[in-house]
Amino acid sequence: MEIRTFAELLNRVREMRPLVHHITNTVTINDCANITLHTGGAPVMAHAPEEVEEMVGLASSLVLNIGMLTSSQVAAMLLAGKQANRRGIPVVLDPVGAGATHFRTESVRRILEEVQVTIVKGNAAEIATLAGERAEVRGVDAGEVAADPIQAAQTLARQLSTVVVVTGKTDIITDGTRTACVDNGHHMMGCITGTGCMGASVLGCFAPVADDPWIAAVAAVTAYTIAGEIGGEIGGESADGPGSFKWRFFDAMAGLNAEKIAEKAKIRQVAPSPNL
């Protein structure tokens, strides 16, 4: 893999300034808007079923996040997702808490049945659940997962003909054939609410600027986790706590460039699972 290919996609994001339409989690909606801006995109948060199709008509990509799911929101997501498919713009789905309740799990399955999703991003338990494996989901957090996360991700990617991102200490990005692991990041990213939601927003920024969604996803995850790494250790000094880390993280994302990504990227490619 040519690291520079992934690094330079950030320049394309900032040149294109994609309009990223979010139907997302109200707990983290402000953070998602900010990280979109800091990455180089333009955020719009429109949830009403009465306007989502029209808003998708203006957007470069669509991000769907089920963190605080309602029946009205499911309806809006289906309308927006189908309109995105008609327009040919990428759709990013964050199945927050899939497996925790019947409503969440069935809503995600319905979205995946009716909308062609470009990138599915979740933790190991959420992805294992969608792949048909046994997993424990504690609210929106991952619990015990029996399945190998790489194999579960590859299985789901092949089932859906999509790119799957599994977040964790090591992030996994696969289209079922090509699989990359990204080892960047900082432990403080797990100490603030919304790092997963914001990661989906960054995917929404990168997805419209590359013809290959796997390359876009690898580039997005790498940029995002490097920003977390830099934010945790700016100037050689560690963040004092989650509050100072969050603002350092935003500053690091805004100040990130292709040179820093090329210098710090820890990307490795792994072979497809022989069991698939």
Image (cartoon, rainbow, N blue to C red):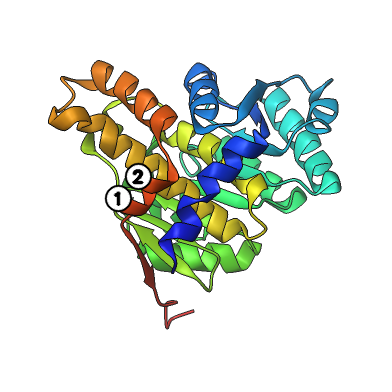
Q: Amino acid at mark 2?
A: Lys
Q: Residue at x 59, y 69 (%)?
A: 158
Q: Which mark is residue 260?
A: 2
Residue 62 appears in which quarter of the rendering? top right
At x 83%, y 30%, the residue is 53
Name the residue nearer the viewer: 202 or 14.
14
Asked if residue 95 shows in the view, the reply is: no
Q: Which mark is residue 115?
A: none
Q: Quadrant of residue 157?
A: bottom right
**Residue furthest to the bottom:** 274
Position of residue 201 measured from the top left corner of the image (x, y, whole percent): 54, 34
What secondary structure is found at the residue carrying circle 2? Answer: helix
Residue 28 higher or lower than 74, as above or below: above
Relative to residue 23, is residue 150 depicted above or below?
below
Residue 185, position as x, y percentages in the image: 29, 43
Query: How far from the left and from the top, in percent, is residue 64?
Result: 63, 36
Q: Check disc 1 and give the amino acid type.
A: Lys
Name the residue located 33 percent from the left edge and 19 percent from the top edge.
Answer: 247
How many neighbours does mark 1 have within 10 angstroms: few (below 14), some (14-19), or many (20 or more)?
some
The answer to whether residue 86 is visible is: yes
Q: How many marks?
A: 2
Q: Residue at x 15, y 20 (%)?
A: 240
Q: Position of residue 153 (x, y in %)?
A: 47, 62
Within-10-Å neighbours for mark 2: few <14, some 14–19, many 20+: some
Are the residues tagged 1 and 2 within 8 Å (C-beta)?
Answer: yes
Q: CA distance from mark 1 to mark 2?
A: 6 Å
Relative side of 59 to 12, left or right: right
SS of the residue at dot 1?
helix
Q: In which quadrant is the N terminus drawn?
A: bottom left
Residue holding disc 1: 264
